[in-house]
Amino acid sequence: MAYIQLLAGLAILVVGGETLVRGAVAIADRLGLPRLLVGLTIVALGTSAPELTVSIGAALKGAPDLVTGNVVGSNISNILLVLGVAAIITPIQAQKKIVGRDALFLVVVSSVLAGLCIVGVVSPLVGGVLVIVYAIYSVLSYLSERGAPAASRTDTAGELASEEAAEHGGVPGRLQTAVPVFLGGCIAVVIGADLLVDGAVEIARIFSVPEAVVGLSLLAIGTSLPELAISIIAACRGHSDVALGNVVGSNITNILVVLGATAMVSPIPVADQIAYFDVWVMLGATIVLLPVLVSGWQLSRVEASLFVTAFVVYIVALFMGWPLRLIEVLPFN
């Protein structure tokens, strides 16, 4: 039953997330909202909806390790797996603005997360501050992009989602249709997240696997599928910069909104493994991404293959219990 819950929850979550994004983009289009604003807010929040619903559900069910594991693991998956797979399809050519503004900001917020993990708990007050920082960042990003010449603006996942859905008949034609589609996607995401959390907790109990490991692996990969889908579509369509912007934006959203909003619901204690190992893997992957892009302003297929290989090694290490063994022999506590 646990496996059925996990797989059903994952399937419903993926379909719901896709439906939510398409409905949100359609509503924005029908209301005449700028595509730029859609990409920076609606699509970014929509693709992070699985992480948010899973994290809040885990917090309410008394499984805080799934929360931090999901956020940290999703960010690791986004960089090493999602960007890696997308760049293997088409080398990712980075816009200097993404590296100079958004990627550097991601390093800052990732460093803040590492500090919070060392402290050992994310309080409701800190969670509220993180959400406020995200709101300020979104407003400043929108103003920056809106004031830039059209030729130099960053391509967004919102534009890609609109184009892709329109080509395949996936954007509802009328507002009266788009709203139910969006609401249906929201409901599906909530139901899928509930099933996914229940299944993950049960599997962790049956096999005596730490909840943090389940969050870092199964939940993280599952909730990163919307980002993977958008990034693969972007790579296949030749919009590699969209794939990069999508991942960077999603990782920022995961830290500031997913973790922040969840902490506002309930304080989030951080497991030792995440505090002393996994969050540093996340920060390391984030920092390594910068020189890779700066070296030629692109992520080549060779570098991407190394990213994917590193992700596979990381997942194997998790299930082999190597991080916990490392923590036991080193004088962290």
Image (spheres, helix red, strand yellow):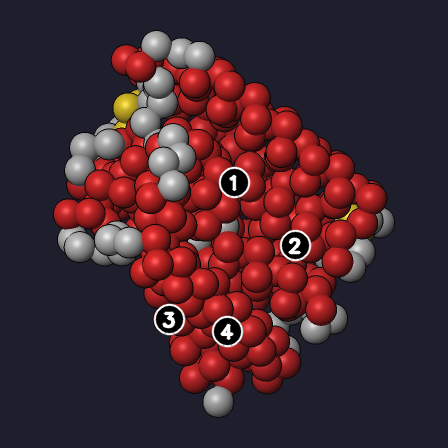
- Residue highlighted by disc 1: 251
> Alpha carbon of mark 3 to alpha carbon of mark 2: how far?
22 Å
Q: What element carries label 3?
A: helix
Q: Where is residue 196 in the image (x, y as percent from the top left)?
A: 51, 72
Q: Position of residue 310 (x, y in %)?
A: 42, 45
> Alpha carbon of mark 4 to alpha carbon of mark 3: how far?
11 Å
Q: Measuring 44% from the left and 69% from the top, which residue is drawn there?
A: 188
Q: Quadrant of residue 94?
A: top left
Type of the residue with mark 1: Asn
294 is higher (above) or lower (below) than 205: above
Type of the residue with mark 3: Ala
Which class describes the residues within 10 Å of circle 1: few (<14), some (14-19), or many (20+)? many
Q: Which mark is residue 191?
A: 4
291 is higher (above) or lower (below) than 129: above
The first of marks 1 and 3 along the sequence is: 3
> Alpha carbon of mark 1 to alpha carbon of mark 3: how far?
22 Å
Q: State which mark lies toward you, 4 or 3.
A: 4
Q: Which mark is residue 243?
A: none
Looking at this view, is 28 or 306 the one in front?
A: 28
- Residue highlighted by disc 3: 11
Q: What element carries label 4?
A: helix
The first of marks 4 and 3 along the sequence is: 3
Looking at this view, is 223 or 174 the one in front?
A: 174
Q: Is residue 194 left or right of residue 118?
A: left
Q: Measuring 51% from the left and 19% from the top, which residue is drawn there?
A: 143
Type of the residue with mark 4: Ile
Q: State which mark lies toward you, 4 or 2.
A: 4
The first of marks 3 and 2 along the sequence is: 3
215 is higher (above) or lower (below) than 120: below
Q: Are marks 4 and 2 in contact (CB under 8 Å)?
A: no
